[in-house]
Amino acid sequence: MRRLTGFALAAAFGLFLGQTQAGGDKGFKKLFNGKDLTGWKVRLSDPKADASKAFLVKDGEMQVPGESPFGYIATDKSFKNYVVRYSWRYPKDQPAKTTMNSGLLVHIQPGEHKAFPKCFEPQGRHKDHGKIFFIGFGKEEKKESTFDEEAHKKALKASDEWQTTEVTCKADGSIEVKLNGIPVSTAKTALTSGPIGLQTEGAHIHFKDIMIKSLD
């Protein structure tokens, strides 16, 4: 009788977890279809470089070989007041002396730039993943950020394991980053909208399950 009860409890708990995980996707829509780069455009620091080799689609993933000039891939559409979520990992076959570096770009602003645009960057580098940088901002521009190193240490997994980053970008210009479900950083500036991008910075990195949910 005890064994049956224990089995029943375990089954019920498993069902609860499954429902919780499934509920976590409610309201999210795919930004990346897992088949091709429809809805995305590559921009590299060298406009003559072969953009088709910078971001590849394989096994349902967006894979970055890291062998192209620095640059990024961005959505065709602009977004405001949303949550973006994606999974990532750095494969073990990294080039020698390569820093495991990449990043998410949000609120991308129009204009000319050498490699990366004016935007927020929730850092994609493994060692401080989620820390927020302000790319292309002037010294006089108001900007605020926090980074919880202790929370980051608890959240971070080995570089070659799949991990999930979730970034909430609100209409008031505030941003919160969660790594594997744990809040690690916040930021705020006057920027509130723009396309979303992912960087290529010399490392091999894979992305999947790139999703977005509107907060409107």
Image (cartoon, rainbow, N blue to C red):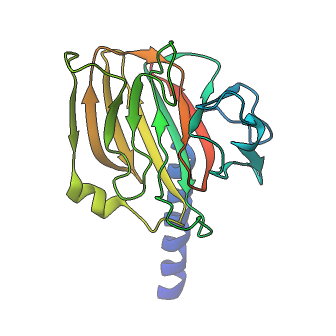
Q: Residue at x 43, y 19 (%)?
A: 81
Q: Nearer the viewer, residue 110 or 14?
A: 110
Q: Is residue 27 visible?
A: no
Front in this rendered view, residue 67 or 127: 67
Q: Is residue 165 left or right of residue 25?
A: left
At which x and y percent is residue 171? 36, 15
How many numbered tags mark residues here?
0
Relative to 204, 111 lies left or right: left
Q: Residue at the location (19% across, 16% down)?
A: 140
The residue that appears at 48% across and 21% down in the rendered structure is: 108
Residue located 48% across and 80% down the image: 6
Q: x%, y% of residue 162?
A: 55, 60
| Vertical relation: 49 (above or below) 53 | above
Q: Is residue 33 visible?
A: yes
Percent from the top left, x then y, of residue 154? Answer: 30, 63
Q: Is residue 165 left or right of residue 45?
A: left
Q: From this view, report whether residue 144 is shown above or below residue 146.
A: above
Residue 29 pos. (x, y %)? 62, 31
Q: In this view of the protein, which residue sits in the foreground, 176 or 198?
A: 198
